[in-house]
Each structure stands twice: as structure tokens, then as C-alpha cells.
Image (cartoon, helix red, strand yellow):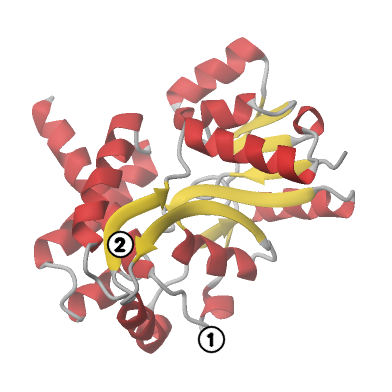
Amino acid sequence: MKEAAFFDLDKTIIAKSSTLAFTRPMFKAGLLSGSTLAKAGVAQAYYQAFGADEDQLTRAKEELSALTKGWSKAEVEALVEETVDEVVAPYVYAEALAIIDDHKRVGRRVIVISASPEEIVRPLCRYLGIDEVIASRSAVDEEGLYTGEIELYAYGPEKAQAMIDMAKEEGINLALSYAYSDSITDLPMLAAVGHPVVVNPDDQLMEEAESRGWEVKHFKSTITLRDKLSSAAVPGAAVATGIAAVLAYWAMRGRKDN
């Protein structure tokens, strides 16, 4: 059977959220309000410092559905192509790229599995040299409009189940495979493989790693993908923008409630 290495994306390979790249262009185009733009900025700072817990991400899924309903995927893609040169590319951990190369060198399949929208994850991963992706999918109707439904939310237990399903279908030995993540929400993903590795873990995941004897890594060095992304568009970024705004809302609300 084959072996694989499964990687979470945000704060594991990418040093910050992959969902905020096109917030300002979407605001300029009138898709997002000024308050949403402000919340997206707060979301980045909050996420960078604290991550997002299970309740916040679940609420983000629900709010995301309402926010993107009726948006034209084709129009979003066209807007992204027009504004891509203005966008600052996400930063990538050099340590993550080195580990990915090591896995490829010994013949393991490298698969990114992320709760972020596939419209963001797939193009970004192509520039990382990663072809295999499992990511959240939003439904589109026959007119090319987002319906407000999410076909796959690759998060928490669903993320782990997607890995298990792939392993069964494609003959991957999970007991000999690796998984990398920073968040306690990915505990099921990490527990599904024989070689779990926690990266820049949040406090809860660090406690789990220590109690289970899992390997812990701390990534610090970043390199930019700006040059690689400057000549190609990343379609569907509006969906990701919505996630950022929703996370900001719940982060701010949670702090007020406390």
C-alpha cells in the first residue's frame, strides 16, 4: 500500500490565513461593505494570534453561506484576474516546504486538506508544487451563482473522514502515513494516521501532543509567493473573504461577551 503526508494549510504551510488575499479588491468592487473590510482586518490579526476555535468555525460556515449566496463565480474570477497584481501573496513556512520535499523524495504522496474554499486552496497549492487537494466546496447553480450551500466542509471530523475515504479508495496506508496541523480542531485528522506531527500548536493541541507523545515542530522562517502568484489569478477568492469576515465577527463578539 502507498504512504502519504497530509498537511493542513493555514498556520501549518501558510504562515497566516489564506482567506484574506482579495478582501480589498472585493470591497472596491462593491461586493463587501466597509464594515466587512474592517472585520476582515481584525480577523487576520486575531487568527494570527489565537487561531479559531470550533464554535467560531462552525458559525463561520453558516454565515458564509448567507454572505456568498447569489454571487457570480464567473464575475468573481474575472475580478480576481483584474486585481491579482495588487494582492500581497500569503507567506509560506520554509520549514514546511522542506518537509514536503522530503516526503516527495521518498515517494510519499503529499495531500493538502483544508477547510478553506477549494477556489483558494487548489491554485495556491499548484504554486507550492502540490497537486492533490481536499478542500471545502461551495455549490453553484446552473447559472453559475453560489447557492449558499456548502457541498463539503472539510473541517474537524469531516476532514478526517475525507482522509479515510481517500485512503480506502486509493490504497493509502494511514498507519504508515503522516499528518501535520496546528489546531485542536484537527485532532481527528492527526489521530487518523500513524505519524501525527503538530506544528505551531495552539494550547489545547499542545496539551494533547504532550499527553500522547506526538512530535511537535515550530516553524518560523517564511518565504513569499508574491512572485509566483503575480502572473496568475486565484479564482473564487470572494468565498474565502467571507470566511475571514465571519471569523472576525465572532472573534469580536466573543471578546465582548467575555
Q: Quadrant of the N terminus?
A: top right
Q: Is residue 241 above or below residue 28?
A: above
Residue extending farthest front: 142
In the image, taking residue 216 as reference, residue 68 lies left or right, namely left
Q: Residue 9: x, y in percent?
A: 54, 50
Q: Which residue is mark 1?
A: 231
Which residue is drawn at the image coordinates 38% and 46% (left, top)?
Answer: 48
Q: Mark 1 packing: few (<14 Cα in 10 Å), some, or many (20+)? A: few
Q: Is residue 152 above or below residue 73?
A: above
Q: Quadrant of the C terminus?
A: top left
Name the quadrant containing residue 5.
top right
Name the quadrant containing residue 241.
bottom left
Residue 15 in view, yes or no: no
> Which mark identifies residue 126?
none
> Which mark identifies residue 241?
2
Nearer to us of marks 2 and 1 is: 2
Q: Is residue 29 above or below residue 195?
A: below
Which residue is drawn at the image coordinates 41% and 85% (left, top)?
Answer: 81
Secondary structure under the numbered disc 2 in the rendered image: helix
Name the quadrant containing residue 94.
bottom right
Which residue is drawn at the image coordinates 29% and 31% (left, top)?
Answer: 55
- Kind of residue at disc 2: Thr
In the image, taking residue 45 as reference, residue 226 lies left or right, namely right
234 or 183: nearer the eye?
A: 234
